[in-house]
């Protein structure tokens, strides 16, 4: 579905299309934070800060997503260090 199709939902003058578009943008903006929380990333706080402050830039959003998807420390996944 194209952006123009989403904005046209409900006809001209009806705010449903732009509201749906705004909700989708909001959800997309916070994807790195959600990924970090779901994965129990070690740097969840840093992901939230980078996403909040720099997520509006494409580079900041990608950096936050990369931080959220970073592989976990093997010691952290297996318990105590051996």
Image (spheres, helix red, strand yellow):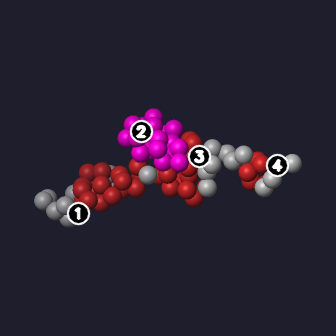
Q: How far apart are marks 2 and 4 (CA)?
A: 35 Å
Of callouts 2 and 3, the N-terminal one: 3
Residue 2 on image: x %, y %: 32, 51
Q: What residue is rendered at 30% in x and 60% in y?
A: 20
> Does residue 2 appear left or right of residue 15 in this picture?
right
Question: In the image, which is nearer the foreground, mark 1 or mark 2?
Answer: 2
Residue identified by numbered label 1: 16
Counting residues from the start of the chain, the first of labels 2 and 4 encountered is 2
Q: Mark 1 against mark 4, which lies toward the viewer?
A: 4
Q: How many marks?
A: 4
> In the rendered view of the protein, which quadrant contains the N terminus?
bottom left
Tell me the number on the disc at residue 40: none
Q: Looking at the image, which is closer to me, 4 or 42?
A: 42
**Which mark is on residue 81?**
4
Magenta stretch?
45-65
Q: Comparing marks 2 and 3, which lies closer to the viewer? A: 3
- Label 3 environment density (alpha carbons within 10 Å; few <14, some 14–19, many ≥20): some
Residue holding disc 3: 43
Q: What element does badge 4 sit on?
A: loop
Marked residue nearer the N-terminal end (3 or 1): 1
Determine the CA span between mark 3 and mark 1.
Answer: 37 Å
Residue at image point 40% right, 41% down: 53
Q: Name the residue under label 2.
A: 54
Residue at image position (74%, 53%) is 77
Residue 15 magenta: no
């Amino acid at each position: 579905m194209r952006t123009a199709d989403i904005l046209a939902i409900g006809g001209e003058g009806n705010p449903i299309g732009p509201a749906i578009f705004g909700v989708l943008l909001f959800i997309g903006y916070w994807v790195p934070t959600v990924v970090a929380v779901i994965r129990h990333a070690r740097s969840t706080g840093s992901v939230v800060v980078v996403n909040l402050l720099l997520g509006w830039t494409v580079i900041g959003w990608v950096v936050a997503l990369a931080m959220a998807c970073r592989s976990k420390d093997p010691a952290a996944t297996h318990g105590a260090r051996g």
